[in-house]
Amino acid sequence: MRTSTFFSFLVAASLSVAAPVPKADVAVEQLGSRATLPDIINVNVKNLYPEDGVYDWDRQIYYQSNLWKGLISTWKRTDSSHFNVKIDGVSSSGDGSQQMAGLSLDNIRGASKLYAVAKPADAFRFDAVHDQGPCSFHSFSLPLSANSKPLWSVDLRPVQAAFQAKYGKRPYGNVASAQDKSGNSYVIFALGAPAIAKVSADGKTVEPWFLENGNGGQRPGYTGVTYLPDIDAIVAFGGPRPLTLFRFSDATPTAHAVTVRGSFGSLDGTEKIKTVPSQNNSGYRLVGAKAPQIYSFASTDGWNSVTFKTFTRNEFNSNSLTSIVEGKNGGQSGIFGTGAYFGEGAHGGRTTFPAYRIDNSLLN
């Protein structure tokens, strides 16, 4: 989602659980003893440049957002099969008016739908305010094929106008979404203001669900969002604070600042965040990308507060780290970090886009 860094924010506290960053060579050595899950998954798709990705646990397929071409790329590691899914009016050869920014599934396990967020191609060009460009949201039924078409598509410009009318601010730069247990979607905006649009499960109703004031930065909005099934809530990443919780039990949409125990540091560079089951039966982890670090948040009080662990590896200094995907092979499972290589542009010519293994300690 970014081509430069986010504004700064400091969370000050102290807790020893905010662990030192493991070095990549340590992780590789540990991974060597469980070789059934590779250290690197090479996705061999030319000019893929994925800003986001999700792993279909049951079908063992990676869905990745081809940023510049505005399409969905699928990759199955077990047989290296691949195809693209194009969206009429969105997909292009790399110079279209919309770009594919975010992907999400309706369920972590047993997914039946895939959702795609397409942002305006000019939204993140900061020579001026580009808040009028086309932007959209799409729902697909799984499994996908190369001929798949959206179940429905939503033009998000009317809800931007509704935000403007209601709050006096027009959010833009839609970058990600999350789904609740009823199939409603929550689309976040990274620019203009921290804002969330709600889209009904059938795509027929779109409303300006929530907006709050930013802190004056160039990129005031949220950069990632994910659903927490254990408390029936969504969590937004970045923007005015590291983590913002929205409980669906609240009478009206309310932003709850999650207390981060440990020094999270600057908000510059926050990207996507994902909900991942722990590997020691201790609940869920929120795993977010803030290049070159991966942050894994855990909570024991219903996500009112969190502790965190971090991890990095040398490759995260140069791949424009943006997203986290799961992976499994045989009886082993884990998480991987992926990047969009923003500086290479739509036709950079790169043929391999690696997903790099993240140490399993972040899931314990």
Image (tube, rainbow, N blue to C red):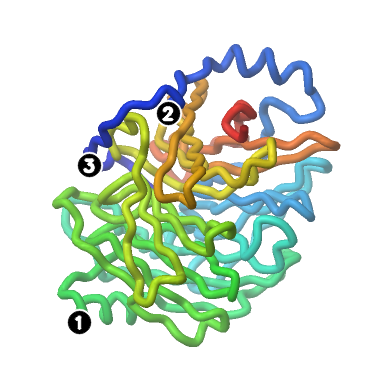
Viewer-closest of 93 and 159: 159
Q: Which mark is residue 165?
A: 1
Give how far across and how far down residue 300 sits, in percent.
Answer: 51, 43
Kind of residue at badge 3 = Phe
* Badge 3: residue crowd in 10 Å (few <14, some 14–19, many ≥20): some
Residue at 34%, 44% (x, y): give it: 259
Kind of residue at badge 1 = Ala
Kind of residue at badge 2 = Pro
Viewer-closest of 277 and 120: 277
Q: Which residue is mark 3?
A: 7
Give how far across and how far down residue 218 sits, in percent.
Answer: 19, 49
- Are the two marked residues, 2 and 3, in contact with CB atoms closer than 8 angstroms? no
Disc 1 is placed on an element classified as helix
Residue at 49%, 52% (x, y): give it: 302
Between disc 2 and disc 3, whose residue precedes?
3
Give how far across and how far down residue 319 sits, in percent.
Answer: 48, 31
Disc 3 is placed on an element classified as loop
Vertical placement of residue 294 versus 179, above or below = above
Vertical placement of residue 166 versus 330, above or below = below
Q: Is residue 99 left or right of residue 85?
A: left
- Identify the image quadrant of residue 189: bottom left
Residue at 47%, 28% (x, y): give it: 310
Q: Is residue 127 left or right of residue 308?
A: left
- Are the two marked residues, 1 and 3, in contact with CB atoms closer than 8 angstroms? no
Q: Which mark is residue 292?
A: 2
Between disc 1 and disc 3, whose residue precedes?
3
Disc 2 is placed on an element classified as loop
The residues tagged by marks 2 and 3 sit, at their Cα atoms, a distance apart of 16 Å
Residue at 58%, 72% (x, y): give it: 139
Give how far across and how far down residue 164 sits, in percent.
Answer: 21, 76
